[in-house]
Amino acid sequence: MPQTITTGYKTLVDAAEREIETLPAAEAVKLAGRSDTVLVDIRDIRELQREGRVSGAFHCPRGLLEFWIDPASPYHKPTFAEDKKFVFFCAGGLRSALAAQTAQAMGLKPVAHIAGGFGAWKAAGGPVEAPEARPETKLSEKK
């Protein structure tokens, strides 16, 4: 029997956005480089390699978020123990809403996420480090 999904991702994201702070990208750009704020990039490493990085952002893949936040976890990252505001972002602002909601539910505060994610950040003129150039792979010449 096929699965019946009763709650879709849009409903989950809408619920998350009712519980957390959502920052317009232009406002988030003003937070870059501040000592009281951590920009948390939850995109997959392949997205960073392909699209570039927000200068100074802390990279935490979405799949490790709960483990890196929890001080009882063997994977805990000290960045999440700092007394700062944590501003999450992904590519388009959906995953980061869910990540910020989860972080807040775990007790991390204050948290927010960037509406429109990395795409909106770039459009707002936020600082971006270009993706690293990947070496070309050349096929062996046939003789």
Image (spheres, helix red, strand yellow):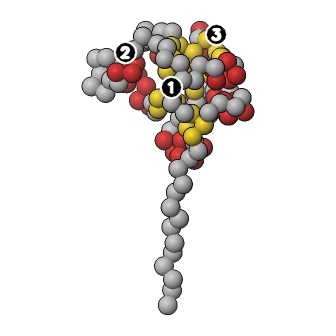
Instruction: State the image coordinates of residue 54 (x, y, percent, origin top left).
Output: 57, 33
Q: Tell me which residue sits at (47%, 29%) in the image.
A: 58
Residue 2 visible in this rendered orientation of the protein: no
Counting residues from the start of the chain, the first of labels 3 and 2 encountered is: 3
Tags 3 and 1 touching, CB below 8 Å: no
Helix, strand or loop for disc 2 = helix
Counting residues from the start of the chain, the first of labels 3 and 1 encountered is: 3
Q: In which quarter of the image is residue 88?
A: top right
Instruction: State the image coordinates of residue 59 (x, y, percent, origin top left).
Output: 47, 32
Distance, label 2 to label 1, CA atoms, is 13 Å
Viewer-nearest of discs 3 and 1: 1
Q: Is residue 88 above or below residue 141?
A: above
Identify the amino acid type marked 2.
Ala
Helix, strand or loop for disc 3 = helix
Identify the amino acid type marked 3.
Arg
**Label 1: how many Cα within 10 Å (few below 14, some 14–19, many 20+):** many
Residue 68 visible in this rendered orientation of the protein: yes
Residue 18 is tagged as 3
Helix, strand or loop for disc 1 = strand
Instruction: State the image coordinates of residue 61 (x, y, percent, origin top left).
Output: 46, 33
Q: Is residue 132 left or right of residue 94?
A: left
Q: In which quarter of the image is the N terminus?
A: top right
Q: Tell me which residue sits at (48%, 79%) in the image.
A: 140
Q: Tell me which residue sits at (53%, 50%) in the image.
A: 132
The mark total stands at 3
In the depicted view, which residue is nearer to us: 134 or 64? 134
Distance, label 3 to label 1, CA atoms, is 20 Å
Residue 40 is tagged as 1
Q: Can you identify the residue that label 2 sits on?
A: 81
Q: Tell me which residue sits at (29%, 22%) in the image.
A: 73
Q: Is residue 10 above or below residue 45?
A: above
